[in-house]
């Protein structure tokens, strides 16, 4: 009974995490109407970094000595996060929320493929086939060369690539390296990059409303971060992970009610393909791990 209860708690945390990330995206998209991209990243980052610093201090992980090898990995991970942030937000500002969220759901497929190519992870033909079908689903959403093609979808696909780099670096970190320290280092790096880039953009006066939206965005992105960790701590990965696709429900609803963006038929077909292949790939990965243990 405890196992079922923990799984339920993990599923709830995962759904809250996805909601937190999408609400953050929605707020950043709204702020972009009045505030330049780099400036909004910098201001949001100041709030998020300060909140993370408080958490890190509470967990005694604010100042941590790490070996040179770990520091190089953390720096590469931070670079991936910085590049992904700018690619993703550039696409987010110029694309329907549901479309870019759907493209990002190809991330598990990209990570699985990159793990096979660069980390020597064993991947069977079924998962390779699922990856190929999943990326075909992304192409259906993007529709390059079509009448409805949005070139900013390429920025979203670049974001998937940089997030894959970030996740591969995370997989190479030593288990004893504190997660909170890595998150704080990354958040500070994104904020610093935003501040530097903001120097080359006109600095817009920030209204009280826009600053409030940025503050809420920082809060919601931290909710996403904290609850995603809790989801994996409480529930079994095989049970909890598929609930990450509830992010598409939030994105569709917020896209419709906030931005009046209604996805067309082919976008929904692409979303179904990406989600289906993602769930299948995850299922095969868990099955392979069980076989390897026996």
Image (tube, helix red, strand yellow):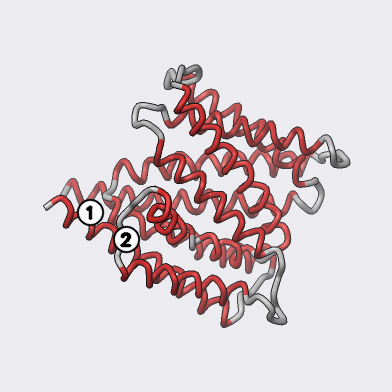
Label 2 Cα crowd, 10 Å radius (few <14 / some 14-19 / many 20+): some
Residue beneath the point at 72% across and 81% down: 147
Label 1 Cα crowd, 10 Å radius (few <14 / some 14-19 / many 20+): few
Question: Left of 208 or right of it: where is 104?
Answer: left
- Relative to 145, does residue 61 appear above or below in the rendering? above
Question: Left of 59 or right of it: where is 83?
Answer: right
Measuring from the top left, give residue 38's x and y in whole percent.
Answer: 75, 42
- Relative to 32, does residue 129 appear above or below in the rendering? below
Which residue is farthest left?
A: 294
Residue beneath the point at 46% across and 29% down: 180
The residue indicated by pointer 1 is 289
The residue indicated by pointer 2 is 123
Measuring from the top left, give residue 50's x and y in whole percent.
Answer: 60, 26
Spatial CA span between label 1 and label 2 = 11 Å
The image quarter in which residue 262 lies: bottom right
Towards the viewer: 242 or 86: 86
Towards the viewer: 273 or 224: 273
Measuring from the top left, give residue 14's x and y in whole percent.
Answer: 40, 51
SS at mark 2?
Answer: loop
The image quarter in which residue 52 lies: top right
- Relative to 20, does residue 169 appear above or below in the rendering? above
Measuring from the top left, give residue 57's x and y in whole percent.
Answer: 49, 19
Residue beneath the point at 38% across and 58% down: 243
SS at mark 1?
Answer: helix
Upstream in the sequence, badge 1 or badge 2? 2
Residue beneath the point at 63% across and 77% down: 143
């Amino acid at each position: 009974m405890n196992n079922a209860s923990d799984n339920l708690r993990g599923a709830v945390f995962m759904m809250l995490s996805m909601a937190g990330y999408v609400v953050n995206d929605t707020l950043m998209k709204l702020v972009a109407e009045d505030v330049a991209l780099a400036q909004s990243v910098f201001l949001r980052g100041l709030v998020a970094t300060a909140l993370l610093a408080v958490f890190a201090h509470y967990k005694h992980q604010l100042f941590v000595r790490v070996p040179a090898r770990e520091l190089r990995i953390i720096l590469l991970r931070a670079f991936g996060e910085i590049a992904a942030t700018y690619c993703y937000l550039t696409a987010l500002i110029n694309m329907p929320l549901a479309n870019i969220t759907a493209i990002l759901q190809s991330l598990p497929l990209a990570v699985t493929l990159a793990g096979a190519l660069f980390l020597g992870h064993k991947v069977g033909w079924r998962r390779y086939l699922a990856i190929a079908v999943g990326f075909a689903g992304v192409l259906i959403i993007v529709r390059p060369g079509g009448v409805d093609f949005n070139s900013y979808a390429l920025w979203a696909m670049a974001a998937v690539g940089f997030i894959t780099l970030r996740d591969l670096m995370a997989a190479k970190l030593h288990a004893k390296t504190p997660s909170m320290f890595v998150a704080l280092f990354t958040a500070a790096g994104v904020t610093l990059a935003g501040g530097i880039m903001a120097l080359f953009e006109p600095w817009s006066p920030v209204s009280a409303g826009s600053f409030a939206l940025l503050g809420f965005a920082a809060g919601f992105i931290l909710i996403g971060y904290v609850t995603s960790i809790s989801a994996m701590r409480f529930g079994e990965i095989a049970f909890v992970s598929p609930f990450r696709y509830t992010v598409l429900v939030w994105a569709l609803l917020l896209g419709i009610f906030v931005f009046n963006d209604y996805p067309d038929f082919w976008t929904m077909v692409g979303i179904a393909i990406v989600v289906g292949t993602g769930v299948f790939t995850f299922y095969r990965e868990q099955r392979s791990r069980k076989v390897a243990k026996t």
